[in-house]
């Protein structure tokens, strides 16, 4: 996440507790930690045709009301109903008539001040722009066959190959040939093609062979006005508004609360039927703003961390940071992911700025999801934007990942070792022929674990291994943040030729897809997408962000390479051992002469592979490199920008040449 577009005013909250001098009966709390914790689920509305029960947790409230509306936006309240204080800081009321189709908000009063309308922190259906919660018939949200929807099989996290995409990037351009451009439903359309009959949409994903689609924020976010969809506004969506509702701008009708829910499920169902699992990008670390947020309008101050002077802490760089360590915030996060996993059949979660959260919360998330299905994956950014207001050793940072079993983090060591430092786009890395990055590349090859041959003191950023298991490391060269691969290579290597660009692009992804970590691909890299050099395209127009599917025609050779690379990994378990001891036993680096050459061997039918010994070499020099290998007759499967597991020829000897700016893979 990187979204520095907004700066928020400083909001002082010190008062909300100190000034709680209170009326006679009101209970006061000396600190947030003393707020009672609500037992059971955080559900805020339970509907039956006979009655609807509303519940809201707000220990400091003096008064709470439910306001009923006919519409999701505009109009006058139908009725305002006073809620009664209940157990554990909750407020409740039951309305004994059929409220189907109505909308509602809560309004909390503290110290003679009404905090303003909110759909609550846990609305599950909302009207346009997420301002009011909706009472809907949930049966109408399930597409046909939803009861029999199942997660596609996944035997090990090591088998994952992730494709990170934004709905508009993927299908907003007219060249996608998709009918529901930029919508959830785009992923349900089969048979879509560009004008040269190359597959697009979901069929493109099937052709490519990825196992998981990772969707950029698709919960309801604030930065797109859902009443102005004709303007084709673009935003990544790192602006959470309602965490437990799908975003409205990707639905065909954001005014009808059931539509976004049903279309989201149709999308999941279509991907599952295609054998592809679905991961959601979740952004619990901050909210769009604070003053108007559902958290702040329900229990002021409680859900956010603060500096000692009472101002908001800002570990997200977006003006605030949430307080995952507080029991009700932790409970909220855990319940929220479980809700998505159960109601929407989501198969994994990518935690934005996971390093803002505390370790205990992440482990609680992992445990709760494992109880539902242990194959649901969790990974995140093991860093924060700025230092969070919480003890460093208790944060879910990359360096602490060994204390979060079965949770993975992105490797910036590998990414920047290959591409160059994130802070200086003109500077290259291994790919650009800069020496000294070899150990960072090797770090990525082993999946961030302890390996006896690595010289950790030479690794970027982390001078020690941080993953206990290779599947705790996500291997990648690009994602939505920063420059995409093509733009990065162009920025770091002025004067790069088209031929070199393709060669280095292939080399980069060969490192990623032969890594023992989890390979991760930014959508469109396979057709050489670019973003016109824009490195923070969070609100850039479609003209920058949308994939131009004519690129698939132009770059058919690259697409073929990516497809076959993915197929290589799929067919050969040696590349995805999934176990640190196996990696240490079977993966051995070969000694090489000179810089910008990394080579390793996967020995002894690694992980049950039918290939006995596999040699992999990465040469980023502009000249061929000589490589000494164990003697034998090798079948070459990847060389000089070509890849084919059926074999590209045979090499004999102890001495082979690795062509310039390319990878070599062969086996015996
Ligand atoms: Ca929205």
Image (cartoon, helix red, strand yellow):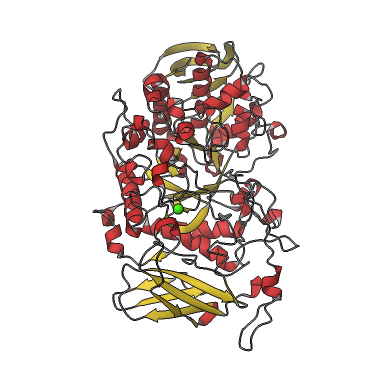
Furthest toward the front, the residue is 75
- Image quarter in which the C terminus is found: top left
Between 211 and 298, the one lying in front of the other is: 298
Q: Position of residue 620 (x, y in %)?
A: 59, 18
State which quadrant residue 96 falls in: bottom left
Is residue 611 at least partly visible in the picture? Answer: no
At horizontal 30% and vertical 65% (from top left) the residue drawn is 137
Is residue 490 at least partly visible in the picture? Answer: yes
- Image quarter in which the N terminus is found: top right
Is 104 above or below relative to 21? above
At horizontal 37% and vertical 34% (from top left) the residue drawn is 209
Is 379 on the left or on the right of 269, as rendered? right
Q: Position of residue 507 (x, y in %)?
A: 52, 22
At horizontal 50% and vertical 15% (from top left) the residue drawn is 498
Furthest toward the bottom, the residue is 24
Furthest toward the right, the residue is 309
Is 299 on the left or on the right of 572, as rendered? right
At horizontal 51% and vertical 72% (from top left) the residue drawn is 107
State which quadrant residue 592 falls in: top right
Between 10 and 504, the one lying in front of the other is: 10
Q: Position of residue 497 (x, y in %)?
A: 54, 14
Q: Position of residue 104 (x, y in %)?
A: 41, 69
Between 233 and 281, the one lying in front of the other is: 233
Is 150 on the left or on the right of 659, as rendered? left
Is 95 above or below relative to 580? below
């Amino acid at each position: 996440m990187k979204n520095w577009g907004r700066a928020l005013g400083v909001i002082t909250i010190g008062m909300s507790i100190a000034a709680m001098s209170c009326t006679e009966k009101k209970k006061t709390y000396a600190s947030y930690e003393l707020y009672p914790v609500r037992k059971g689920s955080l559900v805020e509305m339970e509907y039956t045709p006979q009655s609807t029960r509303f519940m809201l947790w707000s220990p400091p409230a003096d008064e709470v009301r439910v306001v009923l509306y006919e519409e999701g936006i505009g109009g006058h309240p139908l009725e305002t109903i006073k809620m009664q204080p209940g157990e554990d800081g909750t407020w409740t009321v039951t309305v004994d008539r059929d409220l189907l189709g109505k909308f509602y908000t809560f309004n909390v009063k503290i110290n003679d001040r009404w905090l303003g309308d909110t759909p609550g922190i846990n609305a599950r259906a909302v009207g346009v722009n997420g301002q009011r919660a909706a009472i809907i018939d949930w049966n109408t949200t399930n597409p046909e066959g939803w009861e029999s929807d199942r997660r596609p099989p996944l035997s090990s996290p090591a088998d994952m190959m992730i494709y990170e995409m934004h709905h508009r990037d993927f299908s907003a351009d007219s060249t996608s040939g998709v009918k529901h451009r930029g919508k959830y439903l785009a992923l349900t359309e089969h048979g879509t093609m560009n004008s040269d009959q190359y597959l697009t949409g979901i069929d493109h994903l099937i052709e490519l062979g990825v196992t998981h689609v990772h969707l950029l924020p698709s919960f309801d976010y604030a930065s797109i006005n859902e009443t102005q969809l004709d303007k084709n506004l673009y935003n990544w969506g790192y602006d959470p508004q309602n965490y437990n509702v799908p975003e409205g701008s990707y639905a065909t009708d954001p005014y009808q609360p059931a539509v976004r829910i049903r279309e989201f499920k149709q999308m999941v169902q279509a991907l599952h039927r295609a054998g592809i699992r679905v991961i959601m990008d979740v952004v619990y670390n901050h909210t769009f703003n604070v003053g108007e947020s559902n958290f702040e309008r329900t229990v002021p101050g409680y859900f956010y961390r603060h500096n000692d002077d009472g101002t908001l802490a800002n570990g997200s760089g977006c003006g605030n940071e949430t307080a995952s360590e507080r029991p009700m915030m932790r409970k909220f996060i855990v319940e929220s992911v479980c809700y998505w996993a159960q109601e929407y059949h989501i198969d994994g979660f990518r935690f934005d700025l996971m390093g803002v959260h505390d370790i205990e919360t992440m482990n609680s998330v992992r445990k709760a999801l494992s109880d539902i299905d242990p194959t649901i994956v969790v990974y995140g950014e093991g860093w924060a934007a700025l230092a969070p207001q919480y003890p460093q050793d208790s944060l879910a940072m990359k360096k602490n990942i060994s204390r979060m079993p079965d949770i993975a983090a992105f490797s910036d060591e590998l990414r920047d070792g290959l591409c160059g430092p994130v802070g200086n786009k003109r500077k290259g890395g291994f790919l650009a022929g800069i020496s000294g990055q070899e150990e960072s590349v090797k770090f990525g090859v082993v999946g961030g674990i302890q390996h006896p041959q690595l010289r950790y003191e030479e690794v970027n950023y982390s001078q020690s291994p941080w993953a206990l298991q290779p599947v705790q490391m996500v291997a990648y060269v690009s994602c939505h943040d920063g420059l995409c691969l093509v733009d990065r290579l162009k920025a770091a290597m002025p004067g790069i030729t088209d031929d070199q660009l393709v060669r280095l692009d292939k080399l980069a992804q060969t490192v990623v897809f032969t890594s023992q970590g989890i390979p991760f691909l930014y959508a469109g890299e396979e057709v050489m997408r670019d973003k016109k050099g824009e490195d923070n395209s969070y609100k850039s127009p479609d003209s920058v962000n949308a994939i131009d599917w004519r690129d698939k025609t132009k770059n058919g050779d690259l697409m073929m390479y990516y497809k076959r690379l993915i197929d290589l990994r799929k067919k050969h378990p040696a590349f995805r051992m999934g176990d640190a001891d196996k990696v240490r036993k079977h993966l051995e680096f070969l000694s090489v002469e000179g810089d910008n050459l990394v080579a390793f061997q996967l020995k002894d039918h690694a992980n049950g592979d039918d290939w006995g010994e596999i040699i992999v070499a990465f040469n980023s020099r502009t000249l061929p490199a000589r490589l000494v290998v164990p003697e034998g007759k090798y079948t070459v499967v990847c060389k000089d920008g070509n890849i084919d597991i059926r074999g590209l020829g045979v090499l004999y000897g102890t001495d082979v040449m690795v062509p310039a700016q390319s990878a070599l893979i062969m086996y015996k």
